[in-house]
Image: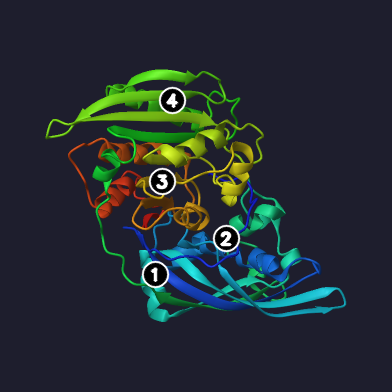
Amino acid sequence: MKFVLLLSMLFASQSFAGILSVSSKEVRFNYKAEFQTSQTEEDAVNLSYSHAQHLFGYLQSPSVTGSFGIDSQTLGIGAPKMPLNFQIISDKKTKGVRTISYKVSGLMILNKLAEAQLTEQKEWHITLPYDLDNFYAEKCTDEHYSSFGDFWYFYDPFRKGCGFLQQEPMAKQVVVKIAPVAKVEDTSAHFADLRGDNGNGDLFDIATINGFSDSAKDSEDIGRQNWEEGNEWLRSLGFQERMVAKYQNRPVIEFTKDLKKADGKIIKVRVTRLLAETGIEYKNVTFAKFFKNALEKADVVIYEGHSGLGGNLDIPALEEKAGKITFDPKKRQLFFFDSCSSYSYYLSTFEAQKSKGKIDILTQGLQSYFWAELPSLKVLFMYLLSPNKDPQWSEVLRAMEKVLEGQTQMLSVGSI
Protein backbone atom coordinates (compact mmCIF):
# COMPACT_ATOMS: atom_id res chain seq x y z
CA MET A 1 0.00 0.00 0.00
CA LYS A 2 1.13 3.53 -0.71
CA PHE A 3 1.18 5.48 2.54
CA VAL A 4 3.70 7.33 4.67
CA LEU A 5 2.33 10.17 6.82
CA LEU A 6 0.26 13.32 6.61
CA LEU A 7 2.39 16.44 6.40
CA SER A 8 -0.01 19.00 5.00
CA MET A 9 -3.67 19.93 5.43
CA LEU A 10 -5.92 22.13 3.33
CA PHE A 11 -8.77 24.33 4.54
CA ALA A 12 -10.31 26.30 1.71
CA SER A 13 -13.28 26.48 -0.61
CA GLN A 14 -13.00 23.95 -3.38
CA SER A 15 -13.82 24.28 -7.02
CA PHE A 16 -16.08 21.71 -8.62
CA ALA A 17 -15.34 20.51 -12.10
CA GLY A 18 -16.87 17.05 -11.84
CA ILE A 19 -15.38 13.60 -12.27
CA LEU A 20 -16.11 10.75 -14.64
CA SER A 21 -15.73 7.14 -13.51
CA VAL A 22 -17.04 3.76 -14.60
CA SER A 23 -16.98 2.36 -11.06
CA SER A 24 -18.05 5.30 -8.90
CA LYS A 25 -19.94 8.59 -8.67
CA GLU A 26 -19.44 11.86 -6.88
CA VAL A 27 -21.94 13.20 -4.32
CA ARG A 28 -22.30 16.22 -2.10
CA PHE A 29 -22.41 15.63 1.63
CA ASN A 30 -22.63 17.49 4.91
CA TYR A 31 -23.01 16.69 8.59
CA LYS A 32 -22.84 18.20 12.07
CA ALA A 33 -20.62 16.65 14.74
CA GLU A 34 -19.32 17.27 18.23
CA PHE A 35 -16.19 16.03 19.98
CA GLN A 36 -14.05 16.62 23.05
CA THR A 37 -10.32 17.15 23.41
CA SER A 38 -7.78 18.40 25.94
CA GLN A 39 -5.98 20.37 23.21
CA THR A 40 -7.05 23.80 24.40
CA GLU A 41 -4.63 25.90 22.35
CA GLU A 42 -5.00 24.35 18.87
CA ASP A 43 -7.14 26.10 16.25
CA ALA A 44 -10.72 24.78 16.19
CA VAL A 45 -10.73 24.24 12.42
CA ASN A 46 -7.52 22.21 12.57
CA LEU A 47 -9.00 20.04 15.32
CA SER A 48 -12.23 19.64 13.35
CA TYR A 49 -10.18 18.49 10.38
CA SER A 50 -8.44 15.91 12.60
CA HIS A 51 -11.87 14.70 13.62
CA ALA A 52 -13.39 14.68 10.12
CA GLN A 53 -10.52 12.74 8.57
CA HIS A 54 -11.74 9.65 10.47
CA LEU A 55 -14.21 9.37 7.60
CA PHE A 56 -11.43 7.60 5.70
CA GLY A 57 -11.22 4.68 8.13
CA TYR A 58 -14.98 4.29 8.33
CA LEU A 59 -15.45 4.39 4.55
CA GLN A 60 -12.76 1.74 4.08
CA SER A 61 -14.03 -0.79 6.61
CA PRO A 62 -14.68 -4.22 5.01
CA SER A 63 -17.91 -4.44 7.03
CA VAL A 64 -19.17 -1.17 5.55
CA THR A 65 -18.16 -2.31 2.06
CA GLY A 66 -20.00 -5.61 2.49
CA SER A 67 -23.15 -3.91 3.77
CA PHE A 68 -23.65 -2.36 0.34
CA GLY A 69 -23.20 -5.65 -1.50
CA ILE A 70 -19.80 -4.64 -2.88
CA ASP A 71 -17.20 -7.29 -3.71
CA SER A 72 -15.19 -8.17 -0.59
CA GLN A 73 -11.91 -7.57 -2.44
CA THR A 74 -12.77 -3.90 -2.92
CA LEU A 75 -10.95 -1.80 -0.35
CA GLY A 76 -13.75 0.56 0.62
CA ILE A 77 -16.82 2.40 -0.62
CA GLY A 78 -15.31 5.83 -1.17
CA ALA A 79 -13.44 8.86 0.15
CA PRO A 80 -13.97 12.59 0.70
CA LYS A 81 -12.41 15.17 -1.57
CA MET A 82 -10.10 17.59 0.19
CA PRO A 83 -10.27 20.36 1.14
CA LEU A 84 -13.56 20.37 3.06
CA ASN A 85 -15.53 23.42 4.14
CA PHE A 86 -15.71 23.84 7.92
CA GLN A 87 -18.00 26.00 10.03
CA ILE A 88 -17.38 26.08 13.79
CA ILE A 89 -20.74 26.13 15.60
CA SER A 90 -19.43 26.29 19.16
CA ASP A 91 -16.13 25.99 21.01
CA LYS A 92 -16.37 25.68 24.79
CA LYS A 93 -13.68 25.06 27.42
CA THR A 94 -14.56 23.65 30.85
CA LYS A 95 -11.97 22.46 33.40
CA GLY A 96 -9.35 21.73 30.75
CA VAL A 97 -11.77 19.92 28.45
CA ARG A 98 -12.73 21.49 25.17
CA THR A 99 -15.98 20.65 23.40
CA ILE A 100 -16.18 21.62 19.74
CA SER A 101 -19.25 21.45 17.53
CA TYR A 102 -18.84 21.96 13.80
CA LYS A 103 -20.53 21.57 10.44
CA VAL A 104 -18.68 20.32 7.39
CA SER A 105 -19.64 20.07 3.73
CA GLY A 106 -17.94 18.94 0.59
CA LEU A 107 -17.72 16.28 -2.10
CA MET A 108 -17.22 12.56 -1.83
CA ILE A 109 -16.57 9.79 -4.33
CA LEU A 110 -18.62 6.63 -3.74
CA ASN A 111 -18.77 3.19 -5.30
CA LYS A 112 -21.76 3.15 -7.64
CA LEU A 113 -23.58 0.53 -5.56
CA ALA A 114 -23.21 2.61 -2.39
CA GLU A 115 -24.04 5.86 -4.20
CA ALA A 116 -27.33 4.47 -5.53
CA GLN A 117 -28.48 3.42 -2.06
CA LEU A 118 -27.30 6.49 -0.18
CA THR A 119 -28.65 9.10 -2.59
CA GLU A 120 -32.02 7.36 -2.41
CA GLN A 121 -31.91 7.32 1.42
CA LYS A 122 -30.56 10.89 1.53
CA GLU A 123 -29.12 10.20 5.00
CA TRP A 124 -26.47 7.84 6.30
CA HIS A 125 -26.07 7.13 10.01
CA ILE A 126 -22.45 6.50 10.96
CA THR A 127 -20.25 6.97 14.05
CA LEU A 128 -17.27 9.26 14.49
CA PRO A 129 -15.01 9.88 17.51
CA TYR A 130 -16.25 11.84 20.51
CA ASP A 131 -13.21 11.41 22.79
CA LEU A 132 -10.72 12.51 20.14
CA ASP A 133 -7.61 12.24 22.34
CA ASN A 134 -8.22 8.62 23.32
CA PHE A 135 -9.80 7.30 20.14
CA TYR A 136 -7.07 4.79 19.48
CA ALA A 137 -6.66 1.05 19.91
CA GLU A 138 -3.76 -0.77 18.28
CA LYS A 139 -5.79 -3.95 17.85
CA CYS A 140 -8.31 -2.07 15.71
CA THR A 141 -5.97 -0.90 12.97
CA ASP A 142 -3.52 -2.09 10.31
CA GLU A 143 -0.63 -4.16 11.61
CA HIS A 144 1.88 -2.25 9.49
CA TYR A 145 0.48 1.25 10.05
CA SER A 146 -0.49 0.99 13.70
CA SER A 147 0.56 4.34 15.16
CA PHE A 148 -1.82 6.90 16.66
CA GLY A 149 -0.97 9.26 13.81
CA ASP A 150 -2.10 6.75 11.18
CA PHE A 151 -5.17 5.55 13.08
CA TRP A 152 -7.69 7.86 11.38
CA TYR A 153 -6.98 6.23 8.00
CA PHE A 154 -6.58 2.59 8.99
CA TYR A 155 -8.90 1.98 11.93
CA ASP A 156 -11.89 -0.35 11.61
CA PRO A 157 -14.60 0.09 14.27
CA PHE A 158 -16.32 -3.09 13.04
CA ARG A 159 -13.34 -5.35 13.67
CA LYS A 160 -13.92 -8.04 16.31
CA GLY A 161 -13.40 -6.57 19.76
CA CYS A 162 -13.54 -2.98 18.48
CA GLY A 163 -17.23 -2.24 18.96
CA PHE A 164 -16.39 0.28 21.69
CA LEU A 165 -15.17 2.59 18.89
CA GLN A 166 -18.84 2.92 17.84
CA GLN A 167 -20.24 3.56 21.32
CA GLU A 168 -20.37 6.40 23.82
CA PRO A 169 -18.32 7.82 25.42
CA MET A 170 -15.72 6.96 22.78
CA ALA A 171 -17.89 7.79 19.75
CA LYS A 172 -21.20 9.34 18.81
CA GLN A 173 -23.62 8.89 15.95
CA VAL A 174 -23.43 11.36 13.07
CA VAL A 175 -26.06 11.82 10.37
CA VAL A 176 -24.45 12.38 6.99
CA LYS A 177 -26.77 14.02 4.47
CA ILE A 178 -26.05 13.01 0.89
CA ALA A 179 -27.22 14.50 -2.39
CA PRO A 180 -26.37 13.66 -6.01
CA VAL A 181 -24.48 16.04 -8.25
CA ALA A 182 -25.17 16.82 -11.88
CA LYS A 183 -24.27 14.01 -14.23
CA VAL A 184 -20.89 14.38 -15.93
CA GLU A 185 -21.12 13.50 -19.60
CA ASP A 186 -18.55 11.32 -21.32
CA THR A 187 -16.01 13.27 -23.35
CA SER A 188 -13.02 12.75 -25.60
CA ALA A 189 -9.79 12.01 -23.77
CA HIS A 190 -8.13 14.59 -26.06
CA PHE A 191 -5.11 12.40 -26.63
CA ALA A 192 -4.84 13.79 -30.17
CA ASP A 193 -4.33 17.24 -28.67
CA LEU A 194 -1.61 15.93 -26.37
CA ARG A 195 0.17 14.33 -29.32
CA GLY A 196 -0.23 17.42 -31.51
CA ASP A 197 1.54 20.78 -31.42
CA ASN A 198 1.02 21.35 -27.71
CA GLY A 199 3.68 23.94 -27.10
CA ASN A 200 6.60 21.72 -28.07
CA GLY A 201 6.23 21.18 -31.81
CA ASP A 202 6.08 17.55 -32.95
CA LEU A 203 7.45 16.20 -29.65
CA PHE A 204 5.04 14.13 -27.55
CA ASP A 205 6.62 14.42 -24.12
CA ILE A 206 5.74 11.91 -21.37
CA ALA A 207 7.33 11.95 -17.89
CA THR A 208 6.89 9.09 -15.43
CA ILE A 209 8.00 8.71 -11.82
CA ASN A 210 8.19 5.46 -9.88
CA GLY A 211 8.57 5.61 -6.12
CA PHE A 212 9.99 2.86 -3.94
CA SER A 213 7.63 0.74 -1.90
CA ASP A 214 9.87 0.21 1.13
CA SER A 215 13.54 0.90 0.50
CA ALA A 216 15.83 2.20 -2.23
CA LYS A 217 18.49 -0.15 -0.86
CA ASP A 218 16.43 -3.26 -1.60
CA SER A 219 17.13 -4.61 -5.09
CA GLU A 220 13.85 -6.56 -4.89
CA ASP A 221 11.72 -3.56 -3.89
CA ILE A 222 8.49 -3.75 -5.90
CA GLY A 223 8.74 -0.09 -6.85
CA ARG A 224 12.12 -0.77 -8.45
CA GLN A 225 10.78 -3.92 -10.11
CA ASN A 226 7.87 -1.99 -11.62
CA TRP A 227 10.27 0.62 -13.00
CA GLU A 228 12.57 -2.01 -14.50
CA GLU A 229 9.72 -4.06 -15.97
CA GLY A 230 8.21 -0.91 -17.44
CA ASN A 231 11.53 -0.09 -19.08
CA GLU A 232 11.79 -3.58 -20.53
CA TRP A 233 8.24 -3.29 -21.90
CA LEU A 234 9.10 -0.03 -23.69
CA ARG A 235 12.15 -1.72 -25.20
CA SER A 236 9.89 -4.52 -26.48
CA LEU A 237 7.79 -1.85 -28.24
CA GLY A 238 10.84 -0.69 -30.18
CA PHE A 239 11.81 2.35 -28.12
CA GLN A 240 15.45 3.44 -28.16
CA GLU A 241 16.97 4.35 -24.82
CA ARG A 242 19.53 6.73 -23.37
CA MET A 243 20.74 6.62 -19.78
CA VAL A 244 20.46 10.12 -18.35
CA ALA A 245 21.48 9.36 -14.75
CA LYS A 246 22.95 6.11 -13.43
CA TYR A 247 22.54 6.63 -9.69
CA GLN A 248 21.23 3.43 -8.13
CA ASN A 249 18.62 5.18 -5.98
CA ARG A 250 17.58 7.81 -8.54
CA PRO A 251 18.24 6.56 -12.11
CA VAL A 252 16.73 8.30 -15.12
CA ILE A 253 16.27 6.74 -18.57
CA GLU A 254 14.98 8.48 -21.68
CA PHE A 255 13.11 6.41 -24.29
CA THR A 256 12.36 7.68 -27.80
CA LYS A 257 10.40 6.43 -30.78
CA ASP A 258 8.75 7.86 -33.90
CA LEU A 259 5.08 7.17 -34.55
CA LYS A 260 3.44 7.65 -37.94
CA LYS A 261 -0.10 8.96 -38.27
CA ALA A 262 -2.46 7.90 -41.04
CA ASP A 263 -1.71 11.13 -42.91
CA GLY A 264 2.03 10.34 -42.83
CA LYS A 265 2.89 12.92 -40.18
CA ILE A 266 5.57 11.81 -37.70
CA ILE A 267 5.09 12.15 -33.95
CA LYS A 268 8.33 12.07 -31.96
CA VAL A 269 7.63 10.37 -28.62
CA ARG A 270 9.90 10.87 -25.63
CA VAL A 271 9.30 9.01 -22.39
CA THR A 272 11.56 10.06 -19.52
CA ARG A 273 11.42 7.74 -16.52
CA LEU A 274 12.69 8.39 -13.00
CA LEU A 275 12.97 5.96 -10.10
CA ALA A 276 13.40 7.81 -6.81
CA GLU A 277 12.53 8.15 -3.15
CA THR A 278 9.45 10.36 -3.27
CA GLY A 279 8.69 10.83 0.42
CA ILE A 280 8.44 14.49 1.39
CA GLU A 281 10.73 13.77 4.35
CA TYR A 282 13.70 12.90 2.13
CA LYS A 283 16.28 15.66 1.70
CA ASN A 284 17.34 14.61 -1.80
CA VAL A 285 16.06 17.10 -4.41
CA THR A 286 16.10 14.84 -7.51
CA PHE A 287 12.42 13.92 -7.35
CA ALA A 288 11.27 17.48 -6.64
CA LYS A 289 13.30 18.91 -9.54
CA PHE A 290 12.20 16.18 -11.96
CA PHE A 291 8.56 16.60 -10.99
CA LYS A 292 8.76 20.38 -11.31
CA ASN A 293 10.20 20.12 -14.82
CA ALA A 294 7.56 17.57 -15.80
CA LEU A 295 4.70 19.72 -14.54
CA GLU A 296 5.99 22.70 -16.47
CA LYS A 297 6.87 21.04 -19.78
CA ALA A 298 5.54 17.50 -20.28
CA ASP A 299 2.32 16.66 -22.09
CA VAL A 300 1.69 13.70 -19.77
CA VAL A 301 2.87 13.36 -16.17
CA ILE A 302 2.49 10.00 -14.42
CA TYR A 303 3.29 9.52 -10.73
CA GLU A 304 3.30 6.02 -9.26
CA GLY A 305 4.25 5.83 -5.61
CA HIS A 306 3.23 6.55 -2.05
CA SER A 307 0.82 9.43 -1.52
CA GLY A 308 2.32 10.19 1.88
CA LEU A 309 -1.28 10.73 3.04
CA GLY A 310 -1.26 13.89 0.98
CA GLY A 311 2.28 15.07 1.69
CA ASN A 312 4.41 13.68 -1.13
CA LEU A 313 3.04 15.93 -3.88
CA ASP A 314 2.50 18.98 -1.69
CA ILE A 315 3.34 21.87 -4.00
CA PRO A 316 4.76 24.34 -1.41
CA ALA A 317 6.98 21.61 0.08
CA LEU A 318 8.26 20.61 -3.37
CA GLU A 319 8.92 24.26 -4.24
CA GLU A 320 11.12 24.58 -1.16
CA LYS A 321 13.40 21.98 -2.75
CA ALA A 322 13.10 22.78 -6.45
CA GLY A 323 11.97 26.39 -6.74
CA LYS A 324 8.73 27.97 -7.92
CA ILE A 325 6.62 25.74 -10.18
CA THR A 326 5.19 27.68 -13.12
CA PHE A 327 2.25 25.96 -14.80
CA ASP A 328 1.59 26.82 -18.45
CA PRO A 329 -2.07 27.92 -18.65
CA LYS A 330 -2.17 27.39 -22.43
CA LYS A 331 -0.71 23.89 -22.52
CA ARG A 332 -3.05 20.89 -22.45
CA GLN A 333 -1.83 18.21 -20.03
CA LEU A 334 -2.76 14.85 -18.56
CA PHE A 335 -1.76 14.04 -14.97
CA PHE A 336 -2.13 10.52 -13.57
CA PHE A 337 -1.57 10.24 -9.83
CA ASP A 338 -1.49 6.49 -9.21
CA SER A 339 -1.28 6.62 -5.43
CA CYS A 340 -3.57 5.93 -2.47
CA SER A 341 -6.56 8.27 -2.17
CA SER A 342 -5.14 10.65 -4.76
CA TYR A 343 -8.72 11.77 -5.51
CA SER A 344 -8.86 13.12 -1.96
CA TYR A 345 -5.41 14.67 -1.82
CA TYR A 346 -4.42 15.85 -5.28
CA LEU A 347 -7.42 16.54 -7.49
CA SER A 348 -8.29 19.94 -6.01
CA THR A 349 -4.64 20.89 -5.61
CA PHE A 350 -3.71 20.41 -9.25
CA GLU A 351 -6.95 21.40 -10.97
CA ALA A 352 -6.53 24.81 -9.35
CA GLN A 353 -3.29 25.33 -11.27
CA LYS A 354 -4.66 25.21 -14.81
CA SER A 355 -7.05 27.23 -16.95
CA LYS A 356 -10.40 25.82 -18.05
CA GLY A 357 -10.31 23.12 -20.69
CA LYS A 358 -6.59 22.46 -20.38
CA ILE A 359 -6.15 19.57 -17.97
CA ASP A 360 -7.35 16.04 -17.26
CA ILE A 361 -6.41 14.48 -13.91
CA LEU A 362 -6.62 10.74 -13.30
CA THR A 363 -6.83 9.80 -9.62
CA GLN A 364 -7.59 6.80 -7.41
CA GLY A 365 -10.39 6.98 -4.87
CA LEU A 366 -9.18 4.06 -2.75
CA GLN A 367 -5.92 2.45 -1.72
CA SER A 368 -3.66 1.89 -4.69
CA TYR A 369 -1.42 -1.17 -4.78
CA PHE A 370 1.99 -1.55 -6.37
CA TRP A 371 1.01 -4.82 -8.06
CA ALA A 372 -1.64 -2.93 -10.05
CA GLU A 373 0.70 -0.21 -11.35
CA LEU A 374 2.13 -1.85 -14.45
CA PRO A 375 -1.06 -3.48 -15.81
CA SER A 376 -3.02 -0.21 -15.75
CA LEU A 377 -0.03 1.82 -16.96
CA LYS A 378 0.36 -0.39 -20.02
CA VAL A 379 -3.29 0.12 -20.93
CA LEU A 380 -2.95 3.89 -20.68
CA PHE A 381 0.25 3.85 -22.72
CA MET A 382 -1.29 1.79 -25.50
CA TYR A 383 -3.96 4.45 -25.92
CA LEU A 384 -1.44 7.28 -25.74
CA LEU A 385 0.86 5.58 -28.27
CA SER A 386 -1.88 4.86 -30.82
CA PRO A 387 -1.42 7.90 -33.10
CA ASN A 388 -4.69 7.49 -34.98
CA LYS A 389 -6.96 6.99 -31.98
CA ASP A 390 -8.70 9.60 -29.84
CA PRO A 391 -10.94 7.55 -27.52
CA GLN A 392 -13.67 8.61 -25.12
CA TRP A 393 -12.68 8.73 -21.46
CA SER A 394 -15.17 6.02 -20.50
CA GLU A 395 -13.41 3.58 -22.82
CA VAL A 396 -10.01 4.36 -21.32
CA LEU A 397 -11.21 4.15 -17.70
CA ARG A 398 -13.01 0.87 -18.29
CA ALA A 399 -9.95 -0.68 -19.93
CA MET A 400 -7.62 0.50 -17.15
CA GLU A 401 -9.80 -1.07 -14.46
CA LYS A 402 -10.51 -4.24 -16.41
CA VAL A 403 -6.95 -5.50 -15.82
CA LEU A 404 -7.31 -5.37 -12.01
CA GLU A 405 -8.65 -8.91 -11.62
CA GLY A 406 -12.19 -7.82 -10.81
CA GLN A 407 -11.15 -5.20 -8.26
CA THR A 408 -11.51 -1.44 -8.42
CA GLN A 409 -9.41 1.36 -7.00
CA MET A 410 -12.21 3.76 -8.01
CA LEU A 411 -10.27 5.35 -10.84
CA SER A 412 -11.76 8.59 -12.13
CA VAL A 413 -10.84 11.53 -14.32
CA GLY A 414 -11.47 15.15 -13.44
CA SER A 415 -11.44 17.61 -16.31
CA ILE A 416 -11.38 21.40 -16.36
Depth check, mark 1 against mark 4: the one in front is 4
Which residue: 44% across, 31% down?
226
Q: Quadrant of residue 2?
A: top right
Q: CA distance from mark 1 to mark 2?
A: 18 Å
Residue 213 appears in the figure: no
Depth check, mark 3 against mark 1: the one in front is 3
Give the mark nearer the N terminus: 4 vs 2.
2
Q: Secondary structure at mark 1?
A: helix
Q: Considering only vertical position in the picture, is 396 above or below 387? A: below
Is 321 or 176 nearer to us in this picture? 321
Tag shown at residue 335? 3
Q: Quadrant of residue 16?
A: bottom left
Q: Are marks 3 and 1 in contact (CB under 8 Å)?
A: no
Percent across and percent down for residue 236 are 29, 22
Tag shown at residue 57? 2
Depth check, mark 4 against mark 2: the one in front is 4
Q: Secondary structure at mark 4?
A: helix
Tag shown at residue 228? 4
Which residue: 48% across, 58% down?
348
Label 3 is placed on what type of residue? Phe
Depth check, mark 3 against mark 4: the one in front is 3
Label 4 is placed on what type of residue? Glu
Which residue: 75% across, 65% down?
133
Give the mark nearer the N terminus: 1 vs 4.
1
**Label 1: few (<14), some (14–19) or many (≥20) C-alpha neighbours in 10 Å:** many
Residue holding disc 1: 115
Q: Quadrant of residue 50?
A: bottom right
